Image (tube, rainbow, N blue to C red):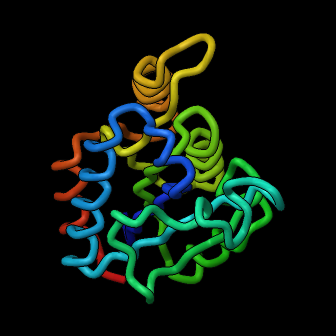
Amino acid sequence: MKNIALLIVDVQTALIDEHPYNQDQFIKNINDLISEARKNNKEVIFVRHDDGEGSELALGAPGWEIYKDLHVLPADKIFEKQYNSAFHKTDLDAYLKSKDIDTLVIMGLQTEYCIDATLKQAFSLDYEVLIPKDTNTTFDNDYLSGEKLYEFYNKNIWAGRFGEVLEVEVVKEKLTKVRQI
């Protein structure tokens, strides 16, 4: 690892207001990692989904805002996206390369949609991907609970294939050991 950054995807008011699986632990863990990253001069990057006019996630709508309990600073870089992957038709990859970032700690919503797409595209772009436990989440659907979806993706799809699924404390240690931005 040369340089590491946090990538926090779609933790937006409208989504949190729907109460995803493990919501409180999810927010706590993300904030703990944000604090650790800042303490170690690591970049914290947010991604916000714009679902188009008329949606709760429409650009500028109250639900589109980054969730109020996250520790966002005015200087934090925020990317807007309209597709599942935070990389698709955004300048995220160019920005990360300009900062010599090669390792991403990926967190956010929803496990089976935007996190899965972002994580797999990060992997295909040769980023090292770290997935802290209990920092991605989703909702129950017609087939599986949010908890089952979380477990399936974290344990069966991503771990050892597209990234490392690690305890939050292990990721905190990694944030102290790599080069500063």
Tell me the quarter of the image containing the C terminus.
Answer: bottom left
Q: Residue at x 21, y 68 (%)?
A: 36
Q: List x then y, in percent, for residue 12.
A: 52, 57
In the rendered view, does 30 fall on the left or right side of 114? left
Residue found at the far bottom of this picture: 75
In front of the other: 126 or 86: 86
Quarter assignment of residue 166? top left
Residue found at the far right of this picture: 53
In the image, residue 145 above or below residue 173: above
In the rendered view, does 146 fall on the left or right side of 79? left
Quarter assignment of residue 49? bottom right
Tell me the quarter of the image containing the N terminus.
Answer: bottom left
In the image, residue 177 above or below residue 134: below
In front of the other: 80 or 128: 80
Q: Residue at x 83, y 61 (%)?
A: 53
Quarter assignment of residue 136? top left
Q: List x then y, in percent, for residue 125.
A: 64, 55
The total of numbered circles placed on residues is 0
